[in-house]
Image: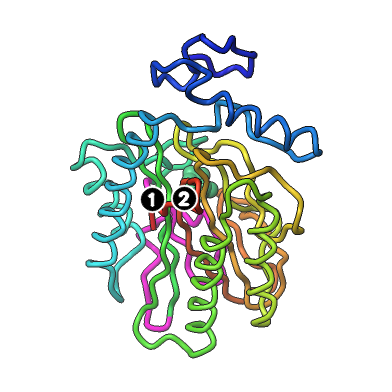
Amino acid sequence: MKFTNEKLERNAPCWCGSGRKYKQCHMNFDERISRFELQGFRVPKRSLIKTKAQIEGIRESAKVNIAVLDAVADKICIGMSTEDIDRIVYEVTTGYGAIPAPLNYEGFPKSVCTSVNHEVCHGIPSEKVILKDGDIINVDCSTILNGYFSDSSRMFCMGNVSPEKKRLVDVTKECVEIGIQNVIPWHPLGDMGSKVHEHAVKNGYTVVREIGGHGCGVEFHEDPFVSHVSQPGTEMLMVPGMCFTIEPMVNMGTDEIYQDSENGWTIYTEDGKPSAQWEVQVLVTETGCEVITW
Ligand code: MF3
Ligand code: CO
């Protein structure tokens, strides 16, 4: 397969591996991308457009990813440690013949990220962190199956969560739903991100700027960076076949964050107020998107 953007001859086999002639396969598609590029849009490289075979592989990986989060949803309870959640994720993922993507990723020591209350993301599971009544926790699960990556996260409310925290969790989920509705092919990603941001701000919240979604599927983190605070009309064009995550981190107070200086991973809100995040992975289609993990 040819994934460089070299120009193909009309009768050459298409770069997508379909076996069809280029002119009968992706030629019009490539020309459409070129026209947008001439208009000044950032456009995806060919390698970001998933082929049929890659999409199948990513969907299979996603099935495991969803099953792992379902297993966590089934078992999570007050009194459990985040290390217990890590164990569930490891056991269920490997039980399906898959690999937890975070494990040893750039030195990350565990199989999943567990971020409680004012932890924004990349919380490291620990025997010492025990879930208490009133906690909100994000469980962020990423899976590799046969070399294909999937990535999604959910929030869990433990027992009697305050109405303020519950509303943060619910509005953050709405932000993702709005993001999904605004994945419109041949429109720029900034249109989607700005809608997510708008909904959070309308509800009195802020959105983390430095960390966002990402292309995902053939690698864990691919282009583009998916901002959830972007301006309409900016950022890379959303083209059918692209696969990326939507994963806004929504804060009750300031959008400012800092990183744990001891473990080098965990991100916290600067003001100590709670943060919530939901994450889905989507595939851009001709009409909108397919949600492949949640
Ligand atoms: N879903 C998270 C992300 O895309 C997973 C991070 S795993 C870690 O950033 F190992 F980097 F923490
Ligand atoms: Co992610």
Amino acid type, residue under disc 1 in the picture: Ile
146 or 272, which is in the foreground? 146
Q: Which residues are magenta?
A: 111-134
Q: Which residue is located at x 60 percent, y 58 percent? A: 267
Which quadrant of the figure contains the C terminus? bottom left
Q: Which residue is located at x 53 percent, y 26 percent? A: 26
Dominant SS in magenta: loop
Looking at the image, is 275 positioned above or below residue 104?
below
Residue 291 on the magenta span: no
Locate residue 101 relative to residue 66 in the image: left or right.
right
Task: Please identify the quarter of the rendering in which residue 193 is found.
Answer: bottom right
Q: Position of residue 45 (x, y in %)?
A: 63, 28
Disc 1/disc 2 C-alpha distance (Å): 5 Å
179 or 95, which is in the foreground? 179
Q: Residues within 10 Å of mark 1 (few under 14, many from 20)?
A: many
Locate residue 94 relative to residue 205 in the image: left or right.
left
Locate residue 28 relative to residue 234 in the image: left or right.
left
Q: Would you say the residues marked 1 and 2 are in contact, meaning their CB atoms lie under 8 Å apart? A: yes
Q: Position of residue 7 (x, y in %)?
A: 64, 14
- To which residue does mark 2 refer? 282
Residue 266 - label: none
- To which residue does mark 1 refer? 292
Q: Which residue is located at x 47 percent, y 52 percent? A: 289
Q: Which residue is located at x 39 percent, y 63 percent? A: 128
Looking at the image, is 83 positioned above or below residue 202?
above
175 or 41, which is in the foreground? 41
Amino acid type, residue under disc 2 in the picture: Val
Q: Position of residue 44 (x, y in %)?
A: 63, 34
